[in-house]
Structures are given as C-alpha cells and as structure tokens.
Image: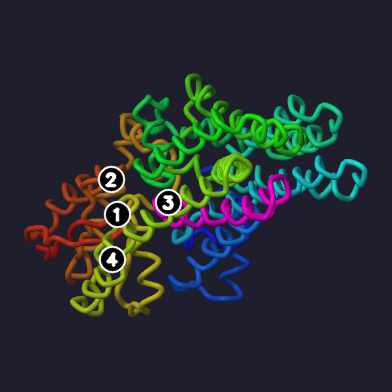
Amino acid sequence: MANTARLPWRELWNRLPLDNLPLGYLALKGWSAVFGESEFALRALSALCYAAAAVLAGLAAGRIAGAAAGIGAALLMASSDRLGLEHAATVRSYALLAFIAALALWQTVRLIDDASRVSRVRLALLCLTHLAGAFTHPTYVLLAASYSLGGLLAAPRQRLAAAAPLAAIAVYLALWAPVLIATVRLGTTRWMQAPSPHDLYNAGALIWGLRPAIVVAILAAGVIAVRRAALARLFSNPAARWVAFSTATAWALPVALSVWKPVFEASRTPLMLLPATCVAIAAVLARGSRVALAAGVLVCAAAATYRIGARPHVDPAPSRATIAALLSRTACGDVVIAPGVSATTAEYYFRRLGAPPCVQLVAFPRDAYDVFADWPGRLGNPAIRSRLEREADSVARGAAAGRRAIWLIGLSTWETREATAIVESALQQVAECGDPEPARGAFIDSVRRCRPR
C-alpha cells in the first residue's frame, strides 16, 4: 500500500479498481505525510487502529454487561495474536476496518441502550461510520447489513438503529457502484474460493488458537447451561440481544454469500468480525460467572504470550536486508529487474535505502493492471501473453544495451511467478546468467546476476 498511497491523486484514483480500499489509502497517505513512510511509521497506523478497536470493544461490552465484561472484551481482542496482532503489525487496511467495525458496534449499543436520547446527530454519525467502513473495504457492506438485520430482529422498537447502516449502504452503492463494477470485471479476487469446512475451522482457530478457542467455547456452553436466569436478564436488554444477533449474522452472511461469490477469506474476514465476537463472548461469560470470564481471558492471554515468546526473533521475510545486500553489489549503470509483485517490495526499499539514481529499477510488467487484475486469466489470453513477451524482450534488450550487470529478482512461490520465467526467457537471448542465489523477502526468493553478451 505504501507505494500506491504516495502516488499523485489522479494516479491513485485510477488504481482504485485494482485495490478497492479508498479510505485505507487516504488514511495512509495522510499519515505518511505527517509521520513519514518508514516501516515503523507505516505499521504504527495499523497498531493504533487495532488498539482503539480493543478499547471500543471494551466500552461496548461494559455498556451491556458491566465493567468486568468490558475489560474481558478488550483483553480478548488483545490476546488475538495470530489474527488481530498480526494485522496490527501489517501495512494494510484490515486493522482500520476492525476499528471502524468496533466504532459502529459501540455507537449502536449506545443508541439502542439509550433510546430516549436518540438524535439526528447520533444517527448521522453512525451512518457516516458505516459509510467509512464500506469505503475501507467493500466486504464491510456485509457487516453493515448484519448490524441492520440484528437491529430489526433484536430491537424492533429502535428501528433507526437498523436504518442507519442501510442508509450508508445505499449511499455507498449510489456513489461507488461504477468502481465496484470495474473491480468485479477486472477479476482481482478470482483467486478466492468458497470456504470449505476446513477453512471455517481455521478461521475460528486463528482467533486465539485452537485449544484456547475450545476452552472459551466450553466455558460459554457451561454458562449457557447453568446460568440461564442470569443470561435471561442479560438478553432482556435490547442492546445485548442486538450484539448476539448481529454477531451470528455477521459470521453467517459472508460464508453464505461465498457459495455464490467468494468473499470470505479465513485469514482476513474474521478480523472485521472480531470486535462483535469478543463483546458477545465477554458479555455471556461475565453475566454467567466472572470466574469463567477470568479463566477464558487468562487462557487466551497466556497462549498468546507463549506463542509470541516462542517465535524466533528474526524477520521471516528480511526484505530490507535482501535489497540492501543487492544494492551493495551493484554499480552505476546496472539494471535491476523486478518481475510481478516483487516490484512492490523492490520499489519501496529502493526508495527507503536511497538507491543511487544511476542504478535503474525496472518493473515487469510495467502496467500494474497486468500484475494485479486477474494475472492467471490475463496470462492465459494468447494476445495478452504475446504482448507481455514482447514487453519482456524490450526490457531485456534495454537492460543489455548498457553493457552493465543485470540483476533479476526471482519469484517462484507466489502468484505472478510466471513473470520471472518470461523475463528469464527474454534475457537468455541477450545475456549470460548465473545460477539463482537464494534470497528472502516479501515476494522475493532469489537473485540472479546476468552479463550482456
């Protein structure tokens, strides 16, 4: 996202159909303008958003089930290392999406819980929050629909709580339908598949880990079986009923829709659902037994702490070190060719490391639409493949014309890996290339040095 966010506004607008996250790019563009685009600064935005999401989840749970539930919900969010904390350290818009989902959750709980103080301003703010969510990621529309359906089922007297997300969806579709249609036509998500039972299992296990999730489920089941009277009092509150209905619907809706058009991705979609899930679980456990709540939180927190401590304290994809080592071997006039998605990593670190202007970085293909708009489908089109091969020939001849070293970044285990093979084939006509040298980085697994003939 860092490379796209720094584009001029017109180029950024033209790129949105490829990665339909306008508010994410807007937030990152503004953030990096103030704090810079170092790795720490870029990741800090996601970390801040996720921390705020945990606080808002705690406030929502505290509103419907007391202070213990609020603390429990926030700690459950903080204990999701494989899902929540992973995305909190990633320069993508998913942590921002979790924050907006938590903000809408808290606003709606307040609106339903204090129906006597409903105002146009509060409704307008809730509508704007849902609109912001849709502009952060298109799948947020499903969460907004779930919040609306939950309001209709759980709090029919507070219909305005159900109307606000519907109004946001209507405004979003009215404003953004052309871009959505363009995104669908480009086929940028054709790699996704309908979730299998194994995918759903993985999604649930990813939140806190399999064993802690089983412990939490057993505790919740025990509370439901033993403390029915306490839960009946909890769900006499329309806000608590709304959270329960909305959470169940928010999980079911994307899975059901994925049978027709895959939208559920096990490692990403649950993050948007995490605030409501934590609030629902914390409220049930707190009203049933504070001991059960404390036990559930302790197990999840302990498991997360152990996993984090047991991980090797090394970067699994040391892109910075890899590009720095490559630049240390280059000389003025050298050309570095970055095929497929490896170009995004190379471009960022060339800029961050202050690569000499006389060392040229060439992305192949040059057009981002060739890389990100249904690469397998485009590569299978004979006309497009022929054009890409001609472009690769042009890139190889241009690199060889300088009579300096040519460095080819290799990518063999990710989509667009075929771009490496296309460039290698073109280089064989104009240069002598050595064996690939192993390398590690985001979308990088080798470097090869070539000498023009």
According to the picture, the residue beneath numbered tag 2 turns out to be: 414
Q: Quadrant of residue 315?
A: bottom left
Q: Report the quarter where the C terminus lies.
A: bottom left
* Callout in the foreground (4, 2): 4
The reply to whether the magenta stretch includes residue 39 is no
Identify the mark nearer the N-term, 4 or 2.
4
Q: Is residue 20 visible?
A: no
Amino acid at pointer 1: Phe
Q: Is residue 321 visible?
A: yes
How far apart marks 4 and 2 lie (CA) works out to 19 Å
According to the picture, the residue beneath numbered tag 1 turns out to be: 443
Residue 133 x %, y %: 65, 46
What secondary structure characterizes most of the magenta part? helix
Q: Which residues are magenta?
A: 58-87
Which residue is depicted at the point 44% across and 59% down?
A: 90
How far apart marks 3 and 1 lie (CA) works out to 32 Å
Q: Which residue is at the front of the view, 382 or 253?
A: 253
According to the picture, the residue beneath numbered tag 3 turns out to be: 300
* Residues at discs 1 and 2 in contact (Cβ within 8 Å): yes
